[in-house]
Image: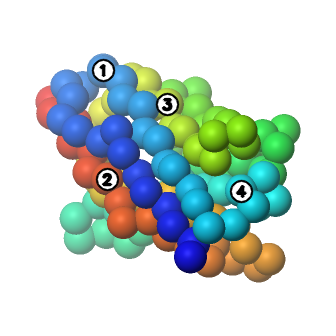
Amino acid sequence: QVQLVESGGGLVQAGGSLRLSCAASGWTFSHYGMGWFRQAPGKEREFVAGINWNGGSTSYAESVKGRFTISRDNAKNTVHLQMNSLKPEDTAVYYCARRGLSTFDYWGQGTQVTVSS
């Protein structure tokens, strides 16, 4: 079955870096775009970054442009989110998701990122 498992979250000081990973299984990974989302306490889930099937096209939320980088390794069925210059407002649960035909159709369980000031 389709599975997405995030890892790499943790506690980091403001200005620090983290690299999130998402391991995918249960489908042909290279056929689908992928995305990262986040949800902070009391807030709606929001889009962070997206990448197309071969990594040739990426998109970012304005709030993370220039600080975060999404990438993928189709040989290893993984997608990554490199997060630099982290701010306390980046604190959230981060989720990876598969881009289906018209929406993001499968989601991981999430990984907590906490940025202390």
Viewer-side label of 1, 4: 4
Q: Residue at x 62, y 77 (%)?
A: 105
Instruction: Using the image, tell me which numbered label, if any, was put on residue 97.
Output: none
Q: Nearer the viewer, residue 28 or 72?
A: 28
Using the numbered discs, state the Cα–Cα distance from disc 1 to disc 4 in whole angstroms: 33 Å
The correct choice, above or below, for 82 with respect to 76 in the image is above
Which of the marked residues, 4 or 3, is nearer the chain's N terminus?
A: 4
- In the picture of the structure, the residue carrying the numbered disc 2 is 111
Q: Nearer the viewer, residue 35 or 45?
A: 35
Q: Which mark is residue 82?
A: 3
Q: Amino acid at mark 3?
A: Gln
Q: How many C-alpha atoms fall within 10 Å of the one at disc 3: few (<14), some, or many (≥20)?
A: some
Q: Position of residue 75 (x, y in %)?
A: 71, 39
Quadrant the N terminus occupies: bottom right
Give the quadrant of the C terminus.
top left
**What residue did someone put label 1 on?**
15
Render colour scheme: rainbow
- Height in image: 115 above or below 33? above
